Image: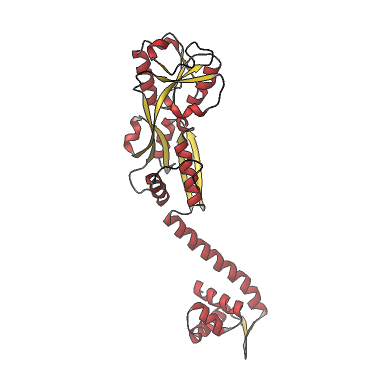
Amino acid sequence: MELRHLRYFVAVAETLHFTRAAEMLGISQPPLSQQILRLEQEIGTPLLKRLTRGVELTEAGEAFLADAQQIVQLADQALENARGIARGISGQLSLGFASSVAFNPRIFTLIRQFTDRYPAMELLTREENMSLLMQDLQEGLLDAAFIRLPCESSKAFNLRVISTEKMLIALPRSHPLSGTPAVALSALADETLIIFPRDVSPSLYELIVTACLRAGFSRHTFQQAPQITTSLGMVAAGCGIALVPESLRCVDNPEVSFCDIENNTLFTDVAFAWRRHHPSKAVLHLLALLAEPPVTPGEAG
């Protein structure tokens, strides 16, 4: 029994007419009749009653029709699923996010554009620190990831920078320099620096620490926060100051004030990273969206 035999039978059973079924299938009537007869012979019982002006289903034919319709439907769905996955318009896309990029608006505008354009694609997302993120990408647990540069381990992957952010100083609202447009790091050298663990983003950690040590900060005045975003809560509580990416300015905390760094040389890139060999079609679709002109969140979709 072949799948085409089931398709032929379903067409005849649903139209109750050999000629109309043959037209619908795009074949001539004699071969269709022969194939249905062979199907009945294989099963060992008639499925159709041949009438002068059409056909009727036998009791066995009615029972067989329900199963045949389901099999044909499943086969069609399997074919459509395979084609959709091959074209990158359905299936799953596993994306990672560095914890430090959680507030970058460009990323989530892209995600919104992608889901609008490919609604059948299921996005599986995971937020991790940079060390785990790059490991998961290397091991194939992720298809791609949004990361923060600089990142030494990112050199093993293809990268496309999607935005550049300057680093800002986050001060408690009660700080004497709160509200100042720009502050030199050296003016804050006696403050406690709240900084995330090195594993969260090793290269960014070194960038911040090096700049602060050059400005006169002392390592023994550093205080660790679990994540970059957590540091803002500690700043609000008056525990110290922090250097954070510009996208964190959107965090609405009335007890935190942001200001520029005077003569700022601290910048960080947000990038899309994917493995160099055999990227999925879904990753290629996301890359194509990255190549399109950026849109504001209100314009997405």
Residue 208: x %, y % from top left: 38, 20
User: Foreground: 117 or 157?
Assistant: 117
Vertical comparison of 208 with 131: above or below: above
Residue 98: x %, y % from top left: 45, 33
Q: Residue furthest bottom?
A: 52
Residue at x 45%, y 55% (from the top left corner): 85
User: Foreground: 218 or 242?
Assistant: 242
In the displayed structure image, the side of residue 45 where residue 180 appears, left or right: left
Residue at x 51%, y 85% (from the top left corner): 29
Q: How is the image coloured?
A: secondary structure
Residue 37 found in image quarter? bottom right
- Can I make out residue 234 in this image? no
Residue 264: x %, y % from top left: 35, 21
Q: How many labels does the image show?
A: 0
- Can I make out residue 285 in this image? yes
Residue 164 found in image quarter? top left
Residue at x 53%, y 77% (from the top left corner): 8
Q: Residue furthest top?
A: 190
Vertical comparison of 263 with 284: above or below: above
Residue 15: x %, y % from top left: 60, 79
Q: Residue furthest right?
A: 59
